[in-house]
Image: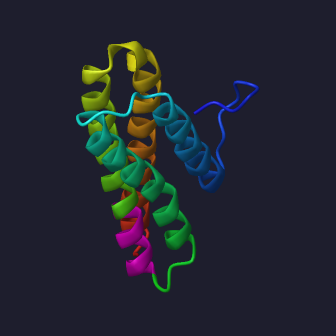
Amino acid sequence: MANDKNVKTYDLGERTAKFSEHVLSLVRGVTDSTINRPMISQLVKSATSVGANYMEADGAESKKDFIHKIGICRKEAKETEYWLRIISSGNPDIKSKCDTLSNEARELSLIFSKIITSSRQNGV
């Protein structure tokens, strides 16, 4: 996501934290209902897990552990993209915000994929 000055953040710890914060801000405005409640729960879990797992990867105990945790980051980013799609289909008033966050989830997933590929190519 772009920061407040529309400049991309390349500090992944900060970028993933901001992503989580933006998702939390989004769901605060979603109507609490029987349908929305489980979707919101899943979205919050997966979105906040992206950054949490990135921080774990940053402190990985081995190269293998690092790749594994980055893989979890990628998986959680993809899951977040899914939940954003589903929640926006049931709440058309937030579709634009969901689309923006979905694009960020996709970008993060691609970044994590590149990290995994590069790490493997460098003998990790």
Residue 44: image location, x then y, percent: 41, 48
- The answer to which of 117 and 6 lies nearer the viewer is 6
Residue 21 lies, with reference to residue 85, above or below; the image says below
Give yes or no for residue 67 being in the magenta stretch: yes
Left or right? Give the position of 100 relative to 32: right
Asked if the stretch drawn in magenta spans residue 41, the answer is no
Q: Residue at x 49, y 38 (%)?
A: 23
Query: Can residue 72 be seen at all in this image of the molecule?
Result: yes
Drawn side of residue 22 relative to residue 88, left or right: right
x, y percentage for residue 48?
A: 47, 53
Furthest residue in direction bottom, as rendered: 61
Residue occupying image coordinates x 28% and y 29%: 85
Q: Is residue 2 above or below residue 52?
A: above
- Give the total of numbered labels: 0
Which residue is farthest right?
5
Residue 86 figure quarter: top left
With respect to residue 22, does 11 lie above or below? below
Q: Is residue 56 left or right of residue 118?
A: right
Left or right of 103 on screen, residue 59: right
Q: What range of the chain is rendered magenta?
A: 63-71
Q: Where the C terminus falls, by quadrant?
A: bottom left
In this view, the residue in front, 114 or 69, is 69
Q: Nearer the viewer, residue 3 or 111?
A: 3
On screen, 8 above or below 117?
Answer: above
Residue located 34% across and 43% down the image: 80
Give the x, y percent position of residue 24: 52, 41
Q: Closer to the camera, 81 or 45?
A: 45
Q: Is residue 78 visible?
A: no
